[in-house]
């Protein structure tokens, strides 16, 4: 018997891609997986050597586009619909899962037009434009935060963001361990997101130099800085005599999280879900110009739970504030332990399993109804 086919539509940023990858790991045990994405560099890096069929859809962003670019954007969207429809006709998927991005919009609309069940995964506390448009068309909506789609509560399940198996394994270890004291040489992890973060790249080496002086001992920094700033950031750390591993992108995040004392990060939805899962003490600096200010809303939610501290980027320029927060986390075992415990309490490690099982139940229900006719 041929396995049913599931289309996974995700692309644009790591925040859309990694949750989809976690779902693929569960789906491919029983189903044929076909990936619809884009040809952006970050996606090509993440999806290198994947075993399942991967198709790229050429679509340009049109939300927020300048008026004189709108005709080109809509022409691009029309071509994207034609490409997507062609892949649907060829593969005849049993259902479609969208994790966001413009490629998800064309896949979701095609699914609705062809009466193929659609499931939408929303990673953020404020839903993205694509998922807001697709919500009325979806059979199920899976969210990471409560009360994201209040108008569609009957078909919403708040399961959390799907995480990679290595992160889930790390979570299990953290749940079993007792509190791990501060390392002799404190390690700080900086995550600027898949695109990097200029403010973090520029200001943090200066702040860490002051931190090292205040602590009276050396620190170690692991810094993800994006594709274009590796040499400049590494030189900045060298100038301040700080031991640092500077990378454009970290692939093995479970390994990176091991032995980290404090994390400074952007507020991407998946980053925050991973920080909760590994029980990290963290200071979150939301991207100030994120679409719909979703990063700020993501971060504030966990801050209300006591699972992180939030610092706006404009506050980062006052280096003393960040320095004081870092000093408190690194000098107070009680403070750090409390934040780690509250972070672990927010973790949802079974999200990928729960989402896939719900999708499978939908498929079984459809087959049962067809058999009864």
Image (tube, rainbow, N blue to C red):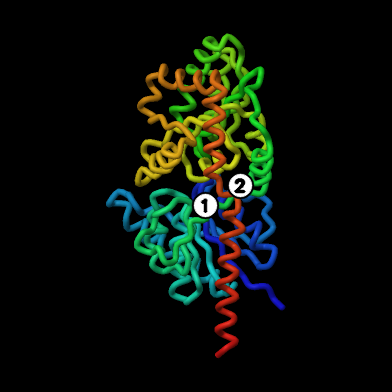
Q: Residue at x 36, y 39 (%)?
A: 289
Q: Residue at x 34, y 52 (%)?
A: 63
Q: Which mark is residue 119?
A: none
Q: Position of residue 84 (x, y in %)?
A: 50, 66
Few, some or many C-alpha atoms within 10 Å of disc 1 (few <14, some 14-19, many ≥20)?
many
Quadrant the N terminus occupies: bottom right
Q: Earlier in the sequence, mark 2 or mark 1?
A: 2
Q: Position of residue 258 (x, y in %)?
A: 66, 33
Above or below for 308 versus 55: above
Q: Nearer the viewer, residue 169 or 78?
A: 169
Q: Position of residue 215 (x, y in %)?
A: 55, 12
Q: Quadrant of residue 243?
A: top right
Query: Outermost residue, right direction?
Result: 1
Query: Outermost residue, left direction?
Result: 67
Q: Residue at x 62, y 50 (%)?
A: 47
Q: Nearer the viewer, residue 31 or 37?
A: 31
Tell me the SS state at disc 2: helix
Q: Position of residue 368 (x, y in %)?
A: 59, 82
Tell me the SS state at disc 1: loop
Quadrant the C terminus occupies: bottom right
Residue corresponding to mark 1: 160
Residue corresponding to mark 2: 46
């Amino acid at each position: 018997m041929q396995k049913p086919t599931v289309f996974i539509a995700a692309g644009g940023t790591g925040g859309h891609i990694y949750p989809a990858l976690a779902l693929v790991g569960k789906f491919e045990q029983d189903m044929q997986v076909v990936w619809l994405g884009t040809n952006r560099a970050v996606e090509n890096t993440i999806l290198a050597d994947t075993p399942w069929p991967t198709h790229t859809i050429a679509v340009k962003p049109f939300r927020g586009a300048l008026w004189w670019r709108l005709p080109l954007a809509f022409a691009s969207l029309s071509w994207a619909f034609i490409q997507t429809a062609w892949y649907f006709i060829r593969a005849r998927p049993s259902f479609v899962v969208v994790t966001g991005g413009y490629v998800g919009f064309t896949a979701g609309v095609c699914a609705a037009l062809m009466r193929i069940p659609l499931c939408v995964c929303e990673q953020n506390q404020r839903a993205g434009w694509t998922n807001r448009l697709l919500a009325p068309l979806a059979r199920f909506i899976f969210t990471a935060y409560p009360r994201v789609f209040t108008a569609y509560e009957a078909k919403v399940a708040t399961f959390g963001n799907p995480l990679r198996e290595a992160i889930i394994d790390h979570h299990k270890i953290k749940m079993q361990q007792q509190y791990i004291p501060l390392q002799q040489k404190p390690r700080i992890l900086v995550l600027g997101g898949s695109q990097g973060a200029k403010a973090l790249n520029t200001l943090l080496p200066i702040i860490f130099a002051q931190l090292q002086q205040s602590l009276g001992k050396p620190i170690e920094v692991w810094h993800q800085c994006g594709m274009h700033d590796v040499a400049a950031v590494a030189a900045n750390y060298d100038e301040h005599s700080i031991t640092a591993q500077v990378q454009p992108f970290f692939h093995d995040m479970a390994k990176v999280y091991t032995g980290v004392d404090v994390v400074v990060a952007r507020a991407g939805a998946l980053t925050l879900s991973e920080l909760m899962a590994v029980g990290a003490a963290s200071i979150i600096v939301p991207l100030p110009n994120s679409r719909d200010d979703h990063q700020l809303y993501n971060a504030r939610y966990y801050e209300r739970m006591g699972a992180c501290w939030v610092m706006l980027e404009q506050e980062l320029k006052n280096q003393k504030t960040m320095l004081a927060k870092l000093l408190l986390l690194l000098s107070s075992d009680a403070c750090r332990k409390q934040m780690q415990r509250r972070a672990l309490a927010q973790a949802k490690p079974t999200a990928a399993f729960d989402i896939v099982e719900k999708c499978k139940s939908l498929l079984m229900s459809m087959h049962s109804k067809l058999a009864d006719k």
